Amino acid sequence: MDSESEHLLDHRRDELRRIVYGTPGEPPARVVAELVALERELQLVAQDGAGGAGRGPSSRSPAPSAGSGVHRWATEPEPELELEPWLETGLEPEPELIREPDGPAVPTPTRRWRLASSLTALAVTAAAIALLGPAREVLSPPRGLEVFERSASAEELDRAGEVSVAAHLDPAVFSSLRSVGHAVGYEFWVYRDGESVCLLAQRDYWFAWVSSCVSLDEFRERGLVRRIPAGEISDLTRPKPVSPDDMVLVEWGPWSAGVEWHDVSGSEPQP
C-alpha cells in the first residue's frame, strides 16, 4: 500500500472514530461496521509492513488505490471480512483494542457495549419518572378539595392518630385527615365527613381542638373561616401589625394550597 492510500484510510478511520466515540447517542450500525473493518485492514497492513519490505500486501486485504480508498470503504467492504459473525452463532466476540497514537488502548464498540448504553438510558428515564411525582407536587401543590385526593404523607400518618383521638373524631373520617399547615400559633387540619368538609384547629401546646364544618356547596362558594380574637394569640406568635383588639381570620378555601390568614381591625365591622 502506498503512503497516500494509507493516509486516506487513516483519515477515514479518524472520521469514523469521531462519529462512534464523540457523538452522543447510539452510533449507526453501518458506521460501527465500517470502523471495525477498517481497523482490521490497517492492522493487517501494519503486520505486513513489519514483516519486511520484500513481503507483499496481505491476500485478505488488497491495498486500495489512492483515488478510491475512501469510497471503497464507505460503499464496498471487503467480501472476505465477516463484520459480525456472532449474528449467526449467537456468540459475541471479544472486543478488539484501538490504540490511539498518544493514548491507551480503547475497546471497539460491541453488542454488549450498546446494550449497556441502552440500559443506562432506561435507568435514567426510570429515575426521572420516579422523581416526577414529588416534583409535580412541589411545583403545583393540591388546592382545596384536591388535598383529599393525594395520599397522606408519613408525617401525617404519624400525627393523624393523635389528632383524631384528641379531637374525638369519628373513626370513619380518620382516613381523610390532612394537614393544611400552621398559622399565628395554631395547627390546622381538614377532613371529610360525608357531604361536609371540616376545618380542625388547635392552639399550640395542648389546647382543645375546635372543629367547624360546612357543606360542599358552601365550601366551594365561601370556603372555611376560623375567627380568632388576637388577644387569644400568644405574644410570641402574634404578628407585629396585629393588636390584641383585632380579629384574625384564618381561611381555607377552594383555591387554597394551605391555610391563609389576615387581620381585621377592632374598629372594623365583622363579616
Image (tube, helix red, strand yellow):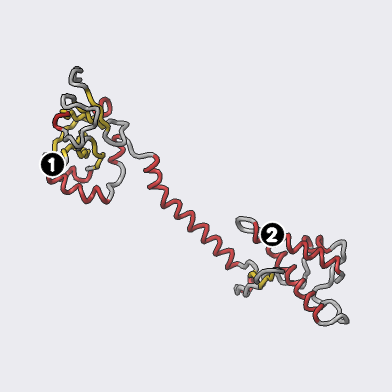
> Residue 176 at what x, y percent from top left?
23, 43
The image shows residue 267 at horizontal and vertical percentages of 18, 18
**Which of the 4 image quadrants contains residue 97?**
bottom right
Residue 148 pos. (x, y %): 28, 40
Find residue 168 and report its image quarter: top left
Q: In this view, does 145 lie to the left or right of 187?
A: right
Element marked by disc 1: loop
Which amino acid is tagged 2?
Arg
Disc 1 residue type? Answer: Ala
Is residue 216 something that shows in the picture?
Answer: no
- Residue shown at the point (69%, 71%) measured from the top left: 99
**Mark 1 → mark 2, Cα distance in angstroms:** 70 Å
- Along the viewing direction, whichever of 268 and 74 lies nearer the viewer: 268
Q: In the figure, 44 relative to 72: above or below?
A: below
Residue at numbered disc 2: 18
263 or 250: which is nearer to us? 263
Q: In the image, which is nearer the foreground, mark 1 or mark 2? A: 2
Query: Dot 2: few (<14), some (14–19), or many (≥20) neighbours within 10 Å?
Result: few
Q: Is mark 2 on a helix, strand or loop?
A: helix
Query: Whole-percent x and y of residue 111?
Result: 60, 67
- Indicate left or right for 177 with 36 as reference: left
